[in-house]
Amino acid sequence: MSTWIAFRGQPLLVAGRFGLTILIAVALACLLGAHPRPERVLIPPADHDPHDRCAVGPRPGALVRHASAESFEMGRFLVVGALLAATFQAVVPREVLLALGQGPVLSVLVLMALAVILSFCSTVDAFVALSFVGSFAPGAILAFLVFGPMIDLKSVLLFRTTFRARTVALLVLLSAQLVRVAAVLINLYAA
């Protein structure tokens, strides 16, 4: 929804973010799901504590408090993300930004690298990516929108709670390659 609000006049980016994210996620899930030895993919599960309050489910008051806290937390990320994107655009000279942003391959690589650093949540990412419109090619913006929420710093740490280090490295590399190829093709043929 946030992508549609941010990019109302650019259906390629809205549909591309949704479609490419689903396509890559399903491809990676099928690849990992087909592994003949799941014990080599997953970390052995920890014993479950039956007295864990989260396992019982939240009470209505706890649910409201949690939703409220999440809203404020996402608001902070929006402000920080916008600040970092604005700082990036203010510090980097416009000529350099345009040189980085218009190449079909380099623009994708630059925004994928920024996505790993600047991605806070998929809702906020749409508005951060909006600040790059006009400076970066559409495929690069799509790469930012797709790659950031998949492979940002906190996602990699979260992956390590479930997957072995080798599996996490494979997820990062495959995601990066799939996003890069799709974004470069969009820059070359659809933009």
Image (spheres, rainbow, N blue to C red):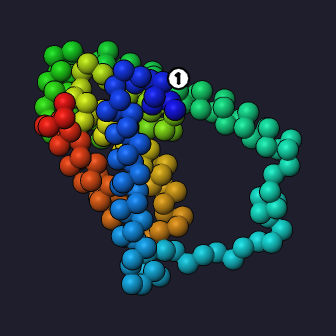
Tell me the SS state at disc 1: helix
- Can you say whether 125 is above or below 91 in the image? below
Q: Position of residue 150 (x, y in %)?
A: 42, 49
Q: Which quadrant is the C terminus positioned in?
A: top left
> What amino acid type should be assigned to the residue bearing mark 1?
Val
Q: Position of residue 60 (x, y in %)?
A: 85, 44
Q: Could you tell me how many numbered marks the image carries? A: 1
Front position in the image: 20 or 158: 20
Q: Position of residue 5 (x, y in %)?
A: 48, 24
Q: Residue at x 13, y 31 (%)?
A: 103
- Can you say whether 66 is above or below 25 in the image? above
Q: Residue at x 21, y 15 (%)?
A: 94
- Can you say whether 158 is above or below 133 in the image? below
Is residue 12 something one can see in this rendering? yes
Front position in the image: 98 or 15: 15
Locate residue 111 relative to residue 101 in the image: left or right. right
Pointer 1: what residue? 79
Q: Residue at x 49, y 63 (%)?
A: 160
- Can you say whether 54 is above or below 34 in the image? above
